Amino acid sequence: MTSEAVRRVQSGSPWEDSFGFARAVAAGDHVIVAGTTAFKGDLLYGDGDPYEQTKVAFATAVEAIGEFGLDIESVIRTRVYLAHSRDVDEVGRAHKELFDTVRPVTTLLVVEGFMDSRVLVSVEVEAFRGPAGP
């Protein structure tokens, strides 16, 4: 794949510079969004609220695919990482509200934790921007 076929978008997160990654990368027909939390700058939205953190994290991820002219309808895969299994219902509720009509494939994992203990949820999104299938 040539470098012209790959485009990267930065969000301004300080982690992008310190770790050397992009918020989203378009490669061919796919746009992939890195792990995204409810942080916007130094402010964590939904502190202590997994439902709100999920909504904010996915809104940020969908905003990233918007840089490529895509929207929530283009999402084909989501991955959700939780700090606590107790939050599955609230996170699932937020996911359903956002993606019920889209129905992407989804993986839900409980992890040991995140770099900031206030983070309860991190999400990844993959979108497809190719031609419509039959």
Image (tube, rainbow, N blue to C red):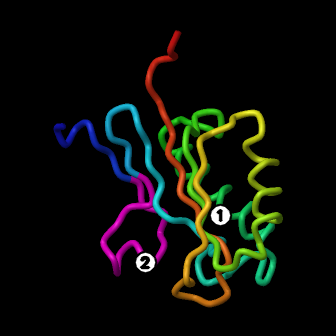
Most foreground residue, 51 or 106: 106
Which residue does the image show at 61% across and 84% down from the upper left? 42
Residue at horizontal 48 percent and vertical 40 percent from the top = 68
Label 2: how many Cα within 10 Å (few below 14, some 14–19, many 20+): few
Amino acid type, residue under disc 2 in the picture: Trp
Instruction: Give coordinates of residue 110: x percent, y percent.
Output: 61, 72
Sequence-wise, the earlier of marks 2 and 1 is 2
Relative to 105, does residue 16 appear above or below in the rendering?
below
Frontmost residue, 111 versus 44? 111
Q: Residue 45 got which mark?
A: none
Q: Is residue 119 left or right of residue 48?
A: left
Q: Nearer the viewer, residue 104 or 63?
A: 104
For badge 1, the amino acid type reads Ala
Q: Is residue 22 magenta?
A: yes
Name the spot of residue 118 as percent of width and height, x first. 67, 87
Q: CA distance from mark 2 to mark 1?
A: 15 Å
Of circles 2 and 1, the one toward us is 1
Q: Are marks 2 and 1 in contact (CB under 8 Å)?
A: no
Magenta region, residue range: 9-24
What is the total number of numbered labels drawn onto the structure image? 2
Q: Is residue 11 magenta?
A: yes
- Specify the quadrant that holds the N terminus: top left
Instruction: Judge from the rendering whether residue 54 lies leftward or rightward of residue 42; answer left or right.
Output: right
Residue at figure coordinates x 30%, y 72% from the top left: 20
Residue drawn 56% across and 43% down?
A: 66
Secondary structure, mark 1, is helix
Q: Say which mark, if any, is on residue 57.
A: 1
> Callout 1: few (<14), some (14-19), or many (20+) C-alpha neighbours within 10 Å?
many
Counting from the top left corner in percent of width and height, residue 91 is at 76, 63
Q: Position of residue 131 (x, y in %)?
A: 46, 18
Residue hosting label 2: 15
Position of 18 compared to 112: left or right? left
